[in-house]
Amino acid sequence: MKPYAELNDTGKLRRLRRLAEAAIRQYDLKEPQIAFYCFATNLLYRVETASGERFMLRLASPGWRTLEDLQSEALWVNALSRQTTIPVPEILPAQSGAQVLPMRLPGIPDAWNATLMRWVPGRLLGHYLNPHNLEKMGGLFAELHRHGAAWQPPAGFTTRRFEHWLSRGEENKIIGAGSLAAAALPAPQFDLLQRLDQHVEAAYAALDRADLRVIHCDLWHDNLKLYRGQLYPIDFEDTVWGFRAHDIAMAMLDLLETVGDAAYPDLLRAFQRGYAAQMPWPQERIEPCQMGRLLWKVNWVARHQPQWLADMVAKHLPVFEHYEQTGQIICPPQG
């Protein structure tokens, strides 16, 4: 058998399909048929049974999320399903009762953690970004934040906290004299990143620790589906302890980068209206957390595509300079 590392992308997907077929046999489904759906962060398959039921099989990429992360996702989704009316995706247990299955096969290095979820109907909210839907999105955030504050997770739930802009244990490649950024960037740009880091860290340190709760941590508009007028949150794999300002900031930064500076203020106000109708808006400003997210993206490029680090920083330089001068986030220039 050819080593996995020597396979091209098509060969790897062909071999991983065997892993998906082995995983789906662990569930009590009648004549399931699987079809490749997409491979981005994780490998997804659409599953349909003889009776017409539809599911999503997710194989989590090794090293991306731990078994504890994915089990924590299942624990919160289960609690939300039992204790709220939020239409979360049902996570199905395998025949063993486990909701996350570490899967291994010869010829495939490392374990891929499998999760089977009932198919969520609708289209991604990114197709329908208008004030009416953003108001609904704000209300949904508030419902999740209310539950995340009141819920008492059982044993086995993650203890990880998102209390800094870099909180997943990633290596920091952009801060400090010995960093990759110090060697790759002009001194003025590097110094600006250091000042922004200090500002953002101070902002996170000032967040009220009483506001810490379980959050989704990745609920941007394309992790929401719209179906018959209702929003369905998906992709809870980043579930973690964190702050409301951080959770909102991540989603609103993605919104800004999608719609641009002109449309963003009205949509943000609609989101705030929906949120405030359910619970008070956080006292802390979200902009420092948005800048923290931008620093995280720069660090990701430094770690995975260092050849593009200088270009990314140059593209975002107007954003960084504007924020340092005004405390406001703007969209990077297009092109």
Image (tube, rainbow, N blue to C red):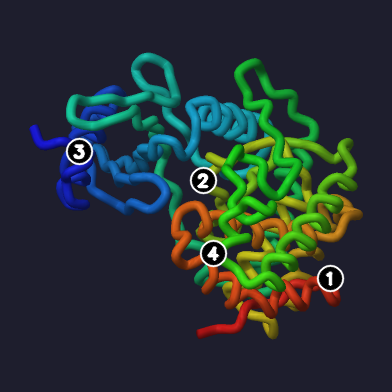
Residue depth check, mark 2 versus mark 4: number of the one nearer the observer: 2
Residues at badges 2 and 1 in contact (C-beta under 8 Å)? no
Do the residues bearing badges 4 and 3 touch, measured as CB atoms within 8 Å? Answer: no
Tell me which label, 3 or 2, sits earlier in the chain.
3
Q: Mark 4 points at which residue?
A: 125
Q: In which quarter of the image is residue 321?
A: bottom right
Residue 135 position within the rendered picture, expressed as x and y whole percent measured from the top left: 72, 65
Quadrant of the image containing the N terminus: top left
The secondary element bearing badge 4 is classed as: helix
Task: State the SS at label 1.
Answer: loop
On the image, numbered disc 3 is attached to which residue? 4
**Distance of mark 1 from mark 3, alpha carbons?**
48 Å
Q: Residue at x 23, y 32 (%)?
A: 108
Give the side of residue 303 with respect to residue 50, left or right: right
Question: Residue visible at 59% across and 76% down?
Answer: 314
Residue on which disc 1 sits: 327
Q: Distance between the residues labelled 3 and 2?
A: 28 Å
Check if mark 4's residue and mark 1's residue have beta carbons within 8 Å: no
Which circle, 3 or 2, is nearer the viewer?
3
Res. 288 in view: yes
Q: Looking at the image, which is closer to me, 251 or 162?
A: 162
Quadrant hosting residue 296 = bottom right
- Sequence-wise, the earlier of marks 4 and 3 is 3
Mark 1: amino acid? Gly
